[in-house]
Amino acid sequence: MAGENEYWNKELETMSFESLREHQLKRLKEQLQYAYENSPYYKKSFDAVKIRTDDIRSFEDYQDMVPFISKSRIIEIQALNPPFGDLLAVDKKELNQLFYAPGPIIFAFTPEEWSSIVESAARALFTMGTRKDDIADCTVNYNWVIAGKLLDDAMKRVGCAVLPGGVGMTKTHIELMKLTNCSILFGFPTFCQQLVETAREMGLKPDRDLSVKLVHVFGEVRTDAGKRGLGEAFGAKVRELYGTAELGIVAVECPEGGGMHLDPNVFVEILDPQTGKPVTWGEGGEICGCDSSRKAIPIIRYRTGDITEGLNLSPCPCGRTTPRLKKILGRVGDIPRIKGMFISSRQIDNVLESFPELGKYQIVVDRPKIRDELTIKVEYKGVIPFEKTAKKLIEDLKVAIRVTPKIKLVEKGTIPDDAPLVDDRRKV
Ligand SMILES: [Zn+2]
C-alpha cells in the first residue's frame, strides 16, 4: 500500500500560504467575471449593488461588495423560472448531469465542470487515505442527490474499486464487505453504526471478521465518543469530511487529525452569523464559501448555515498548507451565542455522555437584565445526589463550552417531546 503521507497534487496542496491566497484570489476573480458575463442572475445582482468585477482586487473587496446567496434564495430564484432559474450560465445543451437536492433545488453540471469537481473530490479522498488498492463500500444515497455519484466517481478517479451499496439493506452490505475484503467504508456515522450492529447480529465481530481499515464519515453532528466507538468497532481509523451540495467537498481530515483541511479551490470565509461580517481569522462562526469550479450554476458567497468552532491555523505535520476546519457545531438558529461563545448541543452531548443518570436536556437562554444567562435543563432518572451531580456537571460544562451555565435538574418526563432544543428567550 502506498504511504499515507503522499499527495494527490503536491503543488496545490503544499504551496505556501501566500501562494495559496494568490491562487484563490485569481480563481475567485475569474469566477466573478465568468458569472457576471454568463449568468443573468449574477449580472442583475452585481448591477443592483453597482459592483464592477474589475473593482474587486482583494479578498477584502470581495467581502465588502459581493452579495451572499443562501439555500432559500436559490429556491426562490429557481421557483421563479424553473428548473434552473436565471442562475444558469451555459446553454442547456451543454448540460449532461442533473441532481435534485431537497429544498427543492436543481443542480446542473457540464461534463468538464463535473470532471474538475470529481478531481477535487478525488484529492480529498486521497488526503483521507483512500488508495488505488482499496475496495470501498459507498453507503451514501445515490438517488437524485449529488453525494453518491460524486463520491463514487471520485473513488474511481483515485483508482479504487467501488461497491455502490447506497443506503439500507445492512445485511447485504455486511455480506459483501466480508466477501470482497472491503477496506473502506463510506457513510453517515449513524448508518455505519447500524452496520456494526447488523454485523454483530449476524454473529460477526467487525474488527475481526471484516477488513475495514478506514471509515470515512460525513454529514452529521457527532460526539467524540461516538467517533471513537465506531473506530474501535471496526478496528479502523475514522476520518471526517465536510461538504454541501452547493460547494462540493469543502474540507477533509488528513491522517494527522486536528481538523479538516480546507479545499484549496473552495474559498471559505467564516462569518459572524448575525452581522454577516467576517470574524477574526481563525475564530468560530458561520461557514460561507465559493467553489470556483462551478460553471453551469455558479454559486458565489454561499452561506451554509453551518457553524464551526473556527480554523486550526497551526502548521499540519502532513505538509498540507490549508487551514484545518474545526468541529461543525450545528446549524445557525440551533446554536445560541452567549457571551461571545457559540453553545452547541454537540459539546453538551460530549459532557452528558459521562452522566448515565441524566437524560434529555434543553438549552435555555435568557437576558433578565443586561447579561445573558444560560441554563441547561436536564432530566434525571431515578434517585440521584442532586448537589454533587449539578456541581460536577457545571464544572465539566464550563470546560467544554467556556461559559458557566446554571443547571436545573428536573424529573424524567418534564421536558415535552416537542420542546425545542434551544429555548432562546432573548428574542422576545
Ligand atoms: Zn494535515
Image (tube, rainbow, N blue to C red):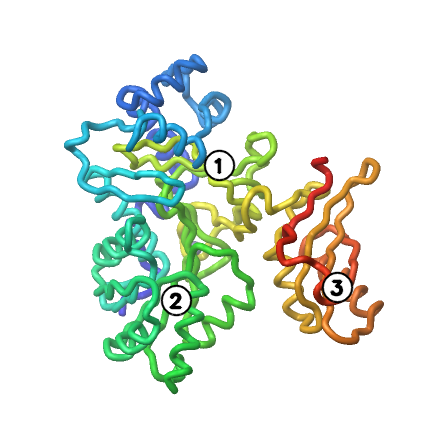
Query: How far apart are the alpha carbons under marks 3 and 1?
Result: 34 Å
Q: Position of residue 100 (x, y in %)?
A: 31, 44
Residue closest to the far bottom = 203
Q: Position of residue 174 (x, y in %)?
A: 32, 76
Is ligand 1 closer than 8 angstroms to the Cβ of mark 2?
A: no
> What amino acid is labelled 3 in the image?
Leu
Residue 235 visible at all: no
Quadrant of residue 238 in the image? bottom left
The disc at residue 215 is: 2
Q: Residue at x 56, y 68 (%)?
A: 225
Q: Which residue is mark 1?
A: 269
Is ligand 1 closer than 8 angstroms to the Cβ of mark 3?
A: no
Q: Residue at x 29, y 66 (%)?
A: 137
Query: Left of 303 or right of it: where is 386?
Result: right
State the residue in front, 102 or 247: 102
Position of 302 relative to 343 (above/below):
above
Location of the C terminus (image quadrant):
top right
| Residues at discs 3 and 2 in contact (Cβ within 8 Å) | no
Q: Residue at x 52, y 67 (%)?
A: 226
Question: Quick one: label 3 or label 1, which is nearer the N terminus?
Answer: 1
